[in-house]
């Protein structure tokens, strides 16, 4: 074994195989290209606006990363985003902002608990279970609001979504704080090891004594809680709640995870990659908007770009 | 007929094959022997087109092969059966046999006749099952025979049997031998890989020995013997394959099972496991041995009573069992035993995270302590891995088994359950595992082992309980524990009176 050559070759090879690093690389290239070739991407304010809007998607995507890493999927996040915003707006109007926020977060977390219960105890496949709860939430919201959700100015949320600290949008700061906490949960804590183990092989994890149920509940609850947080920030950002405000986040959150280099099959990837994934998708959306394309064409391009990027560096490997 | 000429192959800087040269003649059975990691599987994957050599060539009928692929190998008449099953469990036996080679008429699959077409093939491999059964319903051994039938569909001129008999009982092995003889008589060739030396000597015409990726010798069967081949394989004399048994201890039992029953698999099984003793569960394959272990390990619902240190204990999950100090090393190494897609480090740390992050599930795993634990286990069991970060997938079978066993040791289990602990493992590693198990028993563990290998049970265990149709029919120990009596009890299902 030639140790001399392998020690020099390894860091480069490790970087090549690190798909989260690829995500940041591609993000940097696209961003530089946007600054050079597109109108209006070179100002500090555009940068600020971009990271602010990316935060909404990013917060949802971090929860989604935890779930996907365990080889699950959460299709109820769009419903939970709307649930959180609508319920908060409704409750804040009558009982004050703090009650609104609390009720919204508790309800959101509860959705995750129900998801986990269905998946672990009733053995419903995650895709079916979360799609069903998402659908139930949408229906329930329609009944609850009579189709006319309230708008509300919740001061606390307004400043959280639109405020700045030292010129940095607060929403972005919140996103980074959440990312740091999730990083610790996934990559440093015991629960994180269990998540990776389950995502790699459930039978081997069961035989090794991994607490499957507890891990599942933790992950789905955290994912829903984060979708709820995103809903609140969105409510603060727009000042209004709507029944469909969560819709873009369902598939975009999964796309962020995958473009961030995490395997959709679970067990492999890195949380930080998802941050790059969410920024990348937000940047692409903004670029397409800047080119004044019609909504239809924009969606076609967005879909094509996601496929292209995925082929470029985030393909599933054959075993 | 086929020759491998000066073939070299490396994976990520690891030299796996170096200047390997041998040939297979028409109408010949060639045995390819070597320890795990000697390069047998890699050579075979070059022949079947799964991999391409870095240098050297493969010559078929005098012509070097070009643009070799599994597809081309198959159409050139090379068929293969592997230890790892490739059957689709949800399809019927007949569908599996004809997968990719369905009998057709005018482009339409003759689905209705599939079962009829499958029958003669099943007969040939001595398998008496309805071809319309779902393949996943069959026991492991029968599935392996279905694989053989599948390989015969394309009428191979060269058949590769890679540990194809590892899950078979004696009758089934004889059926495989019959097929091999038929092929030889039809002037076809066979390459056999097996860890059962007796089978190789019974069937092969020549033996080619690989060691560390190089051919050490090719011998005519008539001119060699067992010891000679083992010497060539490991480059040294293999003495004391089995460890000595200590004098019987008087320790009381640690785990007592009474009337253990797993519906559909075993019933009324009584067992006593004591510290310092290795108990074996013998019998023909599929007599409920596996389920006894799974019940004790918390993986199978069961009735009956189990007492641990005098207190009743019912393990509803592996977690329950582990908490009580019962560790289970499963039969299905790659699915349950280890996380093949994770690193050696992650595998070894997993059952020990409780001690590496003791405070709570949210506590940070102590990296330093983890690395020390992992390094210590790798050193203690001599796991051959390029680094702790290596994926377990890339280890040889023997080293994977070492990982599957090693990960439990720091949890200090009082009871160790092992299903087929040395299946498909080379003789050198087998010896290491036997000695380790004895060492663990001497250290106070109660050990329970199932095995289809009679010699292993007789050589290793203090006592063997023979199972037949789900229940224990005989218990052998001391001078009664001989291969002959064990086999007789396994086959007849009754107490063998000497």
Image: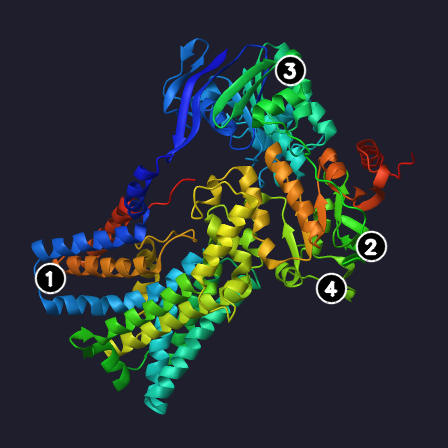
Secondary structure beneath disc 2?
A: loop
Can the viewer see residue A215 in this picture?
A: yes
Res. B157 image quadrant: top right
In the picture of the structure, the residue carrying the numbered disc 4 is: B313
Res. B133 image quadrant: top right
| Residue lying at 12% horizontally and 60% vertically, measured from the top left | A290
Q: How far is the residue under mark 1 from the one under mark 2?
A: 82 Å
Q: How far is the residue under mark 4 from the one under mark 2?
A: 23 Å
Labels 3 and 2: the sequence-earlier one? 3
Q: Is residue B143 or residue B18 the one in the foreground?
A: B18
Query: What number is the disc on residue B250?
Result: 2
Can the viewer see residue B125 in this picture?
A: no
Q: Is residue B367 or residue B394 the one in the foreground?
A: B367
* In-image side of A209 versus B361 (left or right): right
Above or below, comparing residue B401 to residue B314 in the picture: above
The answer to the question of whether label 4 and label 2 lie on touching residues, with beta carbons closer than 8 A, is no
Secondary structure beneath disc 4?
A: loop
Report crowding for label 2: few under 14, some 14 to 19, many 20 or more residues within 10 A (C-alpha). few
In the picture of the structure, the residue carrying the numbered disc 1 is: A41
Disc nearest the viewer among 3 and 2: 2
Residue A120 location, x and y as percent? 55, 62
Query: What number is the disc on residue B224?
Result: 3
């Amino acid at each position: 074994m030639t140790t001399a050559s392998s020690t020099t070759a390894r860091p480069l090879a490790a970087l090549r195989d690190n798909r989260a690093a690829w995500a940041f690389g591609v993000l940097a290239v696209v961003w530089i290209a946007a600054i050079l070739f597109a109108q209006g991407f070179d100002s500090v304010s555009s940068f600020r606006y971009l990271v602010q809007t990316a935060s909404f998607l990013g917060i949802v995507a971090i929860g989604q990363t935890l779930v996907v890493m365990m080889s699950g999927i959460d299709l109820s996040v769009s419903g939970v985003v709307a649930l959180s915003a609508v319920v908060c707006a409704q409750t804040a109007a009558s009982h004050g902002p703090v009650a609104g926020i609390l009720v919204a977060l508790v309800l959101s977390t509860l959705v995750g608990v129900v998801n986990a219960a269905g998946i672990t105890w009733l053995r419903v496949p995650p895709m079916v279970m979360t799609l069903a709860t998402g659908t139930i939430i949408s229906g329930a919201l329609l009944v609850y609001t009579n189709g006319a959700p309230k708008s509300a100015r919740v001061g606390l949320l307004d400043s959280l979504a639109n405020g700045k600290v030292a010129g940095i949008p607060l929403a972005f700061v919140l996103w980074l704080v959440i990312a740091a906490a999730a990083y610790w949960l996934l990559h440093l804590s015991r629960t994180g090891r269990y998540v990776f183990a389950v995502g790699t092989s459930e039978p081997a994890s069961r035989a090794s004594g991994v607490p499957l149920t507890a891990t599942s509940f933790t992950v789905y609850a955290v994912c829903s809680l984060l979708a709820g947080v995103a809903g609140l920030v969105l409510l603060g950002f727009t000042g209004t709640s709507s029944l469909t405000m969560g819709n873009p986040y369902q598939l975009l959150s999964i796309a962020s995870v995958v473009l961030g280099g995490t395997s959709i099959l679970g067990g492999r990837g890195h949380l930080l990659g998802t941050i790059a994934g969410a920024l990348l998708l937000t940047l692409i959306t903004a670029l397409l908007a800047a080119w004044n394309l019609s909504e239809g064409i924009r969606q076609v391009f967005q879909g094509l770009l996601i496929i292209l990027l995925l082929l470029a560096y985030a393909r599933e490997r054959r075993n | 007929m086929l020759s491998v000429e000066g073939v070299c192959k490396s994976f990520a800087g690891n030299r796996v094959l170096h200047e390997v040269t041998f040939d297979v003649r028409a109408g010949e059975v060639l045995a390819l022997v070597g320890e795990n990691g000697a390069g047998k599987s890699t050579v075979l994957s070059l022949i079947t087109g799964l991999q391409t050599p870095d240098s050297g060539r493969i010559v078929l009928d005098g012509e070097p092969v070009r643009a070799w692929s599994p597809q081309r190998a198959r159409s050139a008449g090379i068929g293969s059966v592997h230890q790892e099953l490739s059957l689709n469990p949800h399809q019927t036996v007949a569908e599996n046999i004809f997968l990719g080679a369905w009998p057709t008429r005018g482009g339409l699959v003759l689905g209705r006749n599939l079962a009829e077409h499958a029958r003669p093939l099943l007969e040939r491999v001595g398998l008496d099952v309805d071809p319309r059964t779902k393949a996943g319903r069959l026991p492991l051994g029968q599935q392996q025979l279905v694989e053989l039938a599948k390989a015969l569909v394309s009428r191979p001129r060269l058949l590769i049997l890679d540990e194809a008999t590892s899950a078979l009982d004696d009758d089934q092995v004889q059926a495989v031998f019959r097929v091999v003889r038929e092929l030889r008589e039809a002037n076809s060739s066979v390459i056999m890989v097996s860890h059962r030396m007796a089978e190789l000597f019974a069937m092969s015409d020549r033996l080619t020995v690989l060691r560390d990726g190089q051919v050490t010798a090719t011998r005519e069967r008539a001119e060699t013997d067992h010891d000679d081949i083992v010497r060539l394989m490991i480059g040294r004399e293999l003495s004391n394959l089995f460890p000595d048994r200590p004098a019987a201890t008087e320790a009381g039992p640690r785990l007592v099972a009474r009337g253990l029953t797993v519906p559909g698999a075993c019933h009324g099984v009584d067992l006593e496991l004591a510290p310092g003793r290795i108990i074996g569960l013998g019998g023909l394959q599929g007599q409920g041995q596996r389920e006894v272990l799974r019940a004790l390990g918390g993986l199978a619902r069961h009735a009956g009573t189990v007492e641990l240190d005098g207190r009743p204990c019912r393990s509803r999950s592996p977690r329950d069992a582990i908490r009580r100090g019962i560790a289970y090393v499963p039969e299905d190494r790659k699915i349950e035993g280890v996380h093949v897609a994770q690193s050696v480090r992650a595998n070894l740390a997993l059952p020990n995270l409780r001690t590496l992050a003791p405070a709570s599930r949210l506590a940070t795993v102590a990296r330093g302590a983890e690395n020390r634990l992992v390094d210590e286990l790798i050193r203690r069991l001599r796991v051959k891995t390029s680094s702790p970060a290596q994926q377990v997938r890339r280890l040889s079978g023997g080293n994977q088994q070492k990982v599957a066993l090693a990960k439990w040791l720091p949890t200090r289990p009082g009871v160790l359950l092992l299903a087929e602990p040395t299946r498909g493992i080379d003789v050198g590693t087998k010896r290491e595992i036997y000695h380790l198990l004895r060492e663990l028993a001497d250290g106070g563990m109660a050990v329970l082992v199932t095995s289809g290998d009679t010699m292993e049970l007789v050589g290793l265990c203090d006592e063997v309980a023979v199972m037949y149709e789900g229940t224990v029919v005989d218990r052998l120990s001391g001078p009664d524990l001989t291969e002959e009596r064990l086999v007789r009890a396994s086959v007849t299902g009754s107490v063998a009176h000497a």
